[in-house]
Amino acid sequence: MAEEKLVFDRPHSLLPVITNFCPGCTHGIVHRLVAEAIDELGIEGKTVGISPVGCAVMGYNFFGCDMIEAAHGRAPAVATGVKRVNPDNIVFAYQGDGDLASIGTAETVHAATRGENITVIFINNAIYGMTGGQMAPTSLPNQITQTSPYGRDTAHQGYPVRICEMLSTLDGPAYLERVCCDTPAHVRAAKKAIKKGFQYQIDGVGYSLIEVVSTCPTNWGMTPQNAFQWLRDNMLPYYPLGVYRDVLAEGYDSVLDRAHDRAKESPIAQKTTAIDTVASLMKGGEA
C-alpha cells in the first residue's frame, strides 16, 4: 500500500476546537482563511486580534494568536491603541455589519481616514446575527427581519450602508476589497485579499479593510443552499465584488502620495510636515 500524503490540514493558527457557527454560515470559512494567511506569513507570534460584540465575539476561542475583547463597535479604536503602542505587532479587527456599520460607524470611518496601519475583516450578512435577526445598516431594501417584518422600508429606515464605497471616498485607506465565500473560486479570491490586507500592514502601506459578503441562514430563515442562492440573487448585485482602493496598484508609493495628488490644487495641503518627512525617511526617501 502506498503511503498516504497529507495535503490538507488545519492551520496552526486555528485552534482545534468545535465551532459554534450555524450550518451554512461563512464565519468558519473566513476564520480558516485568516488563520491560513497568518500561518503563511509567519506572523502568529506577533499578531493581535480584536473581537467585538456579535457572532465575532468568540474569536478568542478559535484563533491561536493573542486576542482582545472590545466593546460593541469599538474594535478599530482598540486596534488603533494596540498598534500605536506596539507598532511591530500585526493587529486585525474581526467585525460583523451590526458592529462595524452601526454602533461602530464613527470608529470605522475615523480609523480609516487616519490611515491606521491595521487590517479589518468585515463580515456583511445584512442582518444582526447573534442578537436575534434585527435589521442591520446593511439590510437590503424590502428585506424581512425581526424588526422589519414587512421588509425594510427605505422611506422610513433609509438605504443600506455600502462600506467599501463609503470608505473609498476617504484619503486614508490603502486597500479596500469586497469578496465572498459562496464558491471555491470566491473562497480562493477571498484568501488572496485577506492575505494581501495583512501583507500591506507588514509592509507599512496602511489601513486595509476586506469586506466579506456572507450568509446567515438561521436568521434569514433559509436552508444553507437557499441562503447562498439568495446571496447571489440579491446581495451580490447590491454589493458588487471587487477592489475599491489599492494605492500600490494605482501607481502610488503610499497613501500620502495619493492624498497629495488628489489635493494638488490646494497649497496648504501640499506643505511638508514633520510627519511627512519621517514617513519619507522610513521608506528610504530624502528629507
Image (spheres, rainbow, N blue to C red):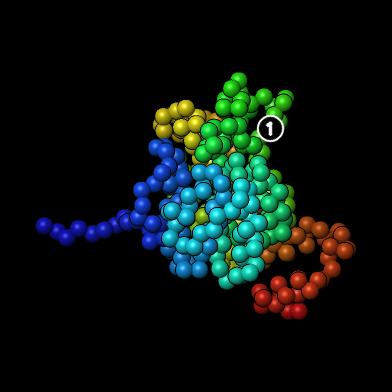
Q: Could you say which is closer to the camera, residue 181 or residue 257?
A: 181
Q: Is residue 279 visible?
A: yes
Where, by quadrant of the figure, is residue 113 drawn? bottom right
| Farthest right residue in view | 267
**From the image, which quarter does the N terminus lie in?**
bottom left
Percent x, y of residue 11: 38, 58
Residue at 57% x, 50% y is 52
Percent from the top left, x then y, of residue 48?
53, 62
* Above/below status of 115 relative to 272: above
User: Which is more toward the observer, 186 or 60?
Assistant: 60
Q: Position of residue 8 (x, y in %)?
A: 31, 55
Eyeballing the image, is 274 above or below 196? Answer: below
For this orientation, the residue located farthest to the top is 150
Q: How many marks?
A: 1
Which picture quadrant has residue 257?
A: bottom right
x 70%, y 77%: residue: 281
Badge 1 marks a residue whose secondary structure is: loop
Instruction: Kindly identify the amino acid type of the residue bearing the numbered disc 1.
Output: Tyr
Residue at 51 percent across and 48 percent down: it is 57
Report the side of 256 relative to 69 (left or right).
Answer: right
User: Looking at the image, can residue 191 be seen?
Assistant: no
Q: Position of residue 14 (x, y in %)?
A: 40, 57
Q: Quadrant of the C terminus?
A: bottom right
Please tell me whether residue 8 is drawn above or below residue 184 in the rendered image: below
Q: Which residue is mark 1?
A: 159
